[in-house]
Image (cartoon, helix red, strand yellow):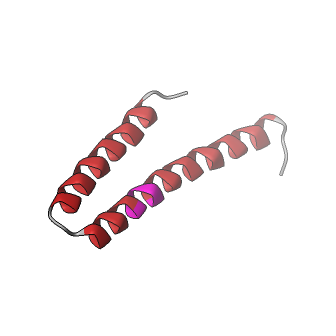
Amino acid sequence: MNVDIIFKIAAVGILIAVINQVLVKAGRDEIAMMTTLAGIVVVLLMVINMINQLFNSVKSIFRFY
């Protein structure tokens, strides 16, 4: 497994947490919630891409077409 994907997910999490805290302190709770949801979507897309690569690897190993 590649370690850089873990660092990318952690970086997105830290960045979204900082942006969320700044927006909450500024009184922009709705925008803070939207940025949190956007961060979750970005991380889910990264994970879905990894799962797709896993399925393609399994398919090629067992020669499923």
Above or below, 36 against 52 in this view is: below
Above or below, 32 against 45 in this view is: below
Q: How many marks can you see? A: 0
- Most distant residue in the left direction: 26
Q: Is residue 47 left or right of residue 57?
A: left
| Range drawn in magenta | 37-41
Q: Which of the pair 13/4 is nearer the observer?
A: 13
Kindly identify the residue that appears in the image at 44 percent across and 33 percent down: 6
Q: Dominant secondary structure of the magenta stretch? A: helix
Kindly identify the residue that appears in the image at 84 percent across and 41 percent down: 63
Above or below, 42 against 6 in this view is: below
Instruction: Residue 40: say if magenta.
Output: yes
Kindly identify the residue that appears in the image at 28 percent across and 68 percent down: 29
In the rendered image, the quadrant that contains the N terminus is: top right
- Most distant residue in the bottom direction: 30
Where residue 57 appears, x then y in whole percent? 70, 39
Where residue 47 appears, x then y in whole percent? 55, 47
Where residue 61 appears, x then y in whole percent? 78, 34
Kindly identify the residue that appears in the image at 44 percent across and 36 percent down: 5
**Location of residue 55 (image quadrant):** top right
Where residue 14 appears, x then y in whole percent? 30, 42
